[in-house]
Amino acid sequence: MREYKLVVLGSGGVGKSALTVQFVQSMFVDRYDPTIEDSYRKQVEVDGLQCMLEILDTAGTEQFTAMRDLYMKNGQGFILVFSIIASATFDELTEIHGQLLRTKDTRTVPIVLVGNKCDMANERKVSQERAKAQADKWNTPFYETSARTRINVDEVFHDLVRMINLQNPAKHDRSKKNTVKCVLL
Amino acid sequence: MSSPSSPSPSGTTARKSALLASYGYPSQPGMVRAVAAAAAASSDSTGPNSPGPLSGRKGSISTTRSSHRYSQLYSMAAEQDVEVEDDLARAQKRLRELKTKISSQSKKNFVLERDVRYLDSRIALLIQNRMAIAEAIAEHLEEADSSDGLFPDDRKLQSYGNLFFLLQTEPRHIATLCRLVSLTEIDTLLQTVMFTLYGNQYESREEHLLLTMFQSVLSAQFETATEFGSLLRANTPVSRMMTTYTRRGPGQSYLKTVLSERINSLIEHKELNLEVNPLKVYEQMINQIEENTGSLPPHLPRGVPPETAAANPDVQAIIAPRLSMVMEIANSFLDTILESLDQVPYGIRWICKQIRSLTKRKYPDATDFSICSLIGGFFFLRFINPAIVTPQAYMLVDGLPSKHPRRTLTLIAKLLQNLANKPSYAKEAYMMTLNPFVENNKARINKFLNDLCEVGDFYESLEMDQYMALSKKEINLNITMNELFNTHQLLAQHRDTLAPQEKHHLRMCLNELGAAPPQVPRKENKTIILPLFSRWETPIQDLHSTFLQETNITQADIMYMETKSILVQLIRSIPGIADKRPLDLMKIAETAATTKDAILVRKGIKVKEMLIELEALNVVDDHFTFMTEEVTEELRHLGNLREKVNEEAASLESVYKTIGDHNNYLRSQLDSYKAYLQNVRMQSGGGNSPGQGSGVGVVTVGGKEAKKGKQQVLGPFKFTHHQLEKDGVIAESNVPENRRSNIFFNITSPIPGTFIIALHYKGRDKAILEMDLKLDDLLEKQQDQVQLLDLEYVHLNVNKVLALLTKTFIKR
C-alpha cells in the first residue's frame, strides 16, 4: 500500500485541526485547543486504490514558523487552509505558498487551497471569486469546506492524493550531485 | 527596569534636592524640550500633575503621592550621579553602554530578518516564474549606506520633529495605526515603533509608553472579537507585536537563563528516543525487525490502525518506561518555569495582566479556568513553547537539534500547552496516556498563571519617568529616511481616523508636511538624527524655580538636600572614609577639605559651611541625627545597587553575545540567498525568465539545453592552503604542517552554478583530488545546517565556501 505524507498548513484559528479531525475521526472539535504538532493516520480508498495517509497537522501560531521548513521538506502534498471569515488568513497563505515553492524548488507541488468555515457564509470576508482567482494563479484546486458540517472534507484529502498520484506515479529520489573523485597519490 | 526600593520615610524632603544638585540648573534649550516632552506625556496618560503639598522637613513623614515620587527621584538621581567615579559609577557606565549596544544590535537583526524574509519571497516568485530576474535582484542587494545623513530641508525636519514628538508622547496614535494597517505593512511600522520610536529597550519610560500602546491595541482586539474561543487566536498585528516584543533584550535573556540549560542537556542525548505514539513505535519496531532478520513475520503487517499498534504487547513494553521519562522531563521543565516567576520580564507579566483584566471585563462570566487558558495562550503558546520546540530559532542552542531530541522537545511543549489549555478531548489518542502530567499539575499551573498577572501598574512610575526624562539633555531619534517617510505615509493614509478634527495637533502636523515622499532607494536610505520638540507646550525656563513653585520647598530645604547630596558624593569619592559607623558627617567634610584633590577640598569646605549654617538655622540638631541616618541609608541602597548592576551587566553580556551570533547567522543566510539569486541571473543569461518548469538550480536556459559554445569557463582561480585557512574556509586540515605550503586549490566554474574545487600539490600536474559542487546542493547543505564539506584532506566550512564562490565568481 502506498503511503502519502500530507501536511495541513495555514494561519492560526482557521480550523486546520477541526478539518483534519473531522476527516480522520468523523467528529467536530468545538473547543479551541491550539496545535503544536499532531499526526494522524488514515486508510482510504481513492479511485479504487487503497492508500495510507499520514497527515501532519501543524501549528498556525506564527511563533512556530521555524518548524515549517522541515514539514515542507518531508511532506508530499499540502493543504493550505484559510478561513473565509478572516481575510488576513487568506493573505497569509501567499507567504506560506512562496516558502513551499522555494523549499520544494519546483513549481509543481501538489497543493489544495481550502477556504474553511463555509457554514458561516453570512460573515464571509473572502469572496469565492477572489479565492478562485488565487487558486488559478497557483494552478491548484480550490474547495470551500465546513469542518463543522462536514462539507467537502473528504474531497479535499482525496483530491490531494490524486494530485500526488498524477504528478508522481512512481517514487523516485532526487539524485545528489556531490561526487568525490579520488586520485591516488 | 530600575525601581528603587522605598527609602526610609525620613528621606522624603531631602531627596528632592539631590535632583537639583545633580542635574544642576539647566539652561540648555534641549532641556526645555525634554520638559515639554515630559509634560505632554503626563497630560496624555496620567492626567495633570498635581503634587500634593509637602509636609516639611527634619524627618517628618510625608505620605503624599508626590513625596513618594520625589523620594524615588532622589535615589534615581544619586544612582546616575555622573560626577563620581567609584565602582558603582564604572559598573553603571558599562551597563549603559551594553544596553545601548543591545538596543542598536537588535534593531539591526530585525532589519536583517526582514531582508531575509524579503529575499525569500523574491526567490519564491522567481520559481513561480512570474518575475523578471533583473527586477528580483534589483536594488535590494546593494548595501545600505550606513553613514549618517543630513536632512535636506530644515523646516521639514522641524515638522517631522514635532510629528514624532507627538507620536512618542501620545502612544494612542500609534496604537490606533497598528490596528488600521495590514499585516504586510506592520513589519515596517513595528520596526519604527519598537526599535526607533520606543527603541531604548531598557529605559522604563519608553518601555511604558510602548506597553501603553500595547494595551490600547489589545483592548481593541477584545472589542472586535466575536466569540471567546477566537480571542487572541489569529495572527494579527497584535500577535506580531507580541512576537517582536518577546524577542527584545529582556525576553531573550529570560529564555536564555531559564530554558537554555535544560534544553541543552536534553539535546546532548542525540540517540535518546522517547517516541510514545504507538503507531510510530510500531513502525520503528518492525523496521528494526526487518533490518535484523531480512523479512517480516506474518503477525506484524505494515500499515496497521492505531488501535492495533497500541495493543501490541511489545510496543506497550517499549512505551511504558518512555512515558514516565517524558513526564519526568516535562516536570523538570515545568519546575524551572514555575520557579522563574520573579525573573519573567515585567512587560510580559504586564501583558498577561491586561489579558486577564480585559477578559474579566468583556466576559464577566468567564471561568477562572478559561481565563487561565487565555493567559497560557500568550505565555506558553507565544513565548515559552516556540523556544522549546525550535530553540535554534531563539538562539538557545547552536544548530538544529537532532531528530530524537527534537521530537522529545515537541512532546514537552505539547504537554505544557495541554496543561495550560486543559482540552477536554485528546485529538491524538496516545496523548491520553500522558494525562497524569496534566492532572498532577493543574493546580500549580493555574496558580502560576494567576501569579504572573500580579504586577503593579506603572502609571505611578510613568509619571516619575517623565521627570527622569529631564536628565536627558535632549530627545533625539536616530531614524532612517524610509522609516520617516513610511510612517508619514501611513499616518497620512489614515489621517481621518487618527485625527478627524482640523485643530488636532497631529492633523496640523500632517497638513503641514503634505504628501509623504516616496521611499528612497536602499543606498540613499540614510540615518538621520531627528530632534524631538513640541511647539505647543510652554517652555519651562528654569527647572529650579519650577520645583520651588510646584512643591513649596524653602531655601533651607534646598540647602539640607544639597548638603546631603554632596556628602554622599564625597563618601563615594574617597575610599575608606565611611568605614566607621556611625558616620561622623562633620569629620567627613573635614577629611575631604584636607585631601590633595582641589575639587574635593572645595566641596569639603563648602559642605562644612553648609552643615554649620543648617545647624544655625535649626534645620538639623547638633548631631545631624536624621541626616546621618539618611546618608547611611542611601549608601546602603547604592551598595546593593552596585551588586545588582554587576549582576545585570553579566547577564546582558551574554545576551549581547547571543544577539551578535544571530546577526552573523542572518548575514550568512542573506549572503547565500544573494548567491542563489545571482546564480539564477547568470543561468538565465541576464534578464530572461528562468527555465520553465525546472528548478532554479538546473542549468538550462529558456527550457532548452544551453549551447555549450556560448558558455564561458571561469577560472581557474588559485588559492593557497594558507590563505583559505586564514579566511576560515578550511575548518580542519589533515595535511601535515610542513606540507601545507605545497598545497593549493584551483577553483573553476565550467558552467554557471557548477564549481570544481581541485586540490593540488606543488610540482604535480594532476590534481590530487577534485570535487564537483553545485551551488544548489551547497545551499541545501546550508539549509540543513550541515557545517562542513568533506574533502578528505581538508574539511571546508560550507558558509565560507559559499561566500568565497560568490566573491570569486559572481562579483566579477
Image: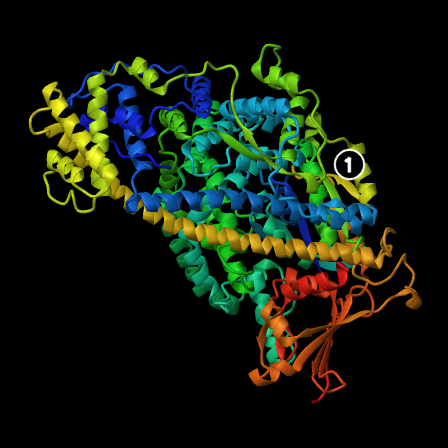
Residue B359 in view (yes/no): yes
Report x, y in % for residue B86: 28, 45
Nearer to the camera, B437 or B613: B613
Q: For this view, does B39 lie left or right of residue B230?
A: left
Q: What residue type is labelled 1?
A: Ala
Report x, y in % for residue B393: 55, 52
Which part of the image, by quadrant, shows the C terminus of chain B?
Answer: bottom right
Is B548 situated above or below B584?
above
Report x, y in % for residue B50: 34, 14
Nearer to the camera, B247 or B481: B481
Which part of the image, by quadrant, shows the N terminus of chain B?
Answer: top left
Q: What residue appears at the point 48 percent right and 15 percent down from the top-left corner?
A: B537
What residue is shown with label 1?
Answer: A131
Q: What residue appears at the point 49 percent right and 48 percent down from the top-left corner?
A: B385
Q: What residue appears at the point 36 percent right and 33 percent down from the top-left corner?
A: B455
Q: For this view, does A54 lie left or right of residue B240?
A: right
Query: Mark 1 falls on what kind of element?
Result: helix
Report x, y in % for residue A92: 68, 40
Q: What residue appears at the point 93 percent right and 68 percent down from the top-left corner?
A: B709
Is B581 situated above or below B664?
above
Which picture quadrant has residue B561? Answer: top left
